[in-house]
Image: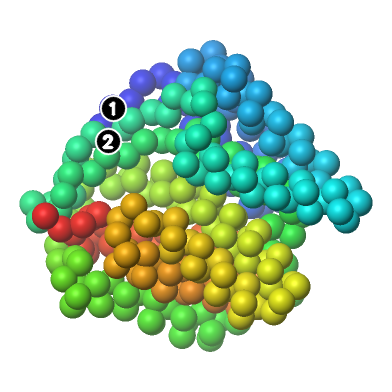
Amino acid sequence: MVFDFSMWIWISLALAIVLAFVQQMKASFILLGISLIGAIIEQRLNFTGLAGVIVGLVIAYKAPNLERKWKYGAYAFIFIWSIALFLHFIPGFNNAKVLDSVVSGPLSIPFTMYLNLDKPLIFFGLLLAYPALLGKKDTFNKQALMLIAVPLFALLPLAWGLGALKPEFTIPSWWWVFALNNLLLTCVAEEAFFRGFIQQELGKRFGWVLGIAVASVLFGLAHIGGGWLLVAFATLAGVGYGLAFHYSNRLWVAVGFHFLFNFLHLVFFTYPLMR
């Protein structure tokens, strides 16, 4: 593992995300601002990247109060801005490589992990642009969530049966940094975009089934770099996360399902793939 003093930026960013989930928005965005200023100081972000961030956040802030025709234009911009951050297309970010070609076990391929500064910003942009992002507290169907968990987590042994993974029980020394990064920086951003934004918005207009279907397919296609089998499994997993969000009406539940799936993959199977 490779750490340096600039890691405090991501600690501040992670705390900002946690505060947002407990509805402490003012404190959350103060910490976000501290993280961005710190990133400039620590040379993890330059002024070109900062400009791209500020433009996106300002448009996101204005979006909810715009007239309908302008609001959809703002949403389209935020959609493209989010994809650009996902793909690291906005220049000026110097993300920290903390794991370099490590292996979770002897049967697994080498794995490299970065602490991304750009990707988590999607969450904050969507939080400003789409006030319903975190969901509502009107329903929470525990029985449905338990039923969803069974086929969702069965995807891992199914992948084993199809030859994509092998069982390998390991708890690598770097499990904790993987867990924190995956939970707070990766899963939050992905669930905010695919479930909190796309699924909710499409669900309101065309019904929850289509909302889950479209969000899940897009989530699957986001994994195209791993091949079509991964796209298929990611799509099915996306259905599980989407149903978790639908039956809980809480974004943190979808984030929790997503993280637990990834962590079980790390501990019980070859990660990310077998040799």
Check disc 1 and give the amino acid type: Val
Closer-to-camera residue (92/221): 221
- Residue under the point 75% across and 73% down: 205
Give the residue pinned by disc 2. Answer: 99
- Residue at 25% over, 77% down: 158
In the rendered image, residue 4, in percent from the top left (x then y), is placed at: 36, 21
Q: Is residue 195 found left or right of 72 in the rendered image?
A: left
Judge from the rendering whether residue 160 lies leftward or rightward of residue 257; answer left or right. Answer: left
Specify the quadrant of the image occupied by residue 53: top right
Q: Quadrant of the C terminus?
A: bottom left
Residue 153 in view: yes
* Residue 260 circle label: none
The crowding category of the residue bearing disc 1, from other C-alpha atoms within 10 Å (few below 14, some 14 to 19, many at least 20), is: few
Question: Looking at the image, is mark 2 or mark 1 earlier in the sequence?
Answer: 1
In the picture of the structure, the residue carrying the numbered disc 1 is 2
Q: Farthest right residue?
A: 67
The answer to whether 32 appears left or right of 231 in the picture is right
Q: Is residue 27 left or right of residue 160?
A: right
Instruction: Give residue 15's quadrant in the image.
Output: top right
Extreme residue toward the left, this view: 106
Q: Residue visible at 75% across and 42% down? A: 60
Disc 2 vs disc 1: Cβ atoms closer than 8 Å?
yes
Q: Is residue 234 above or below residue 79?
A: below
Disc 2 versus disc 1: distance between alpha carbons? Answer: 7 Å
In this rendering, is residue 188 above or below 52? below
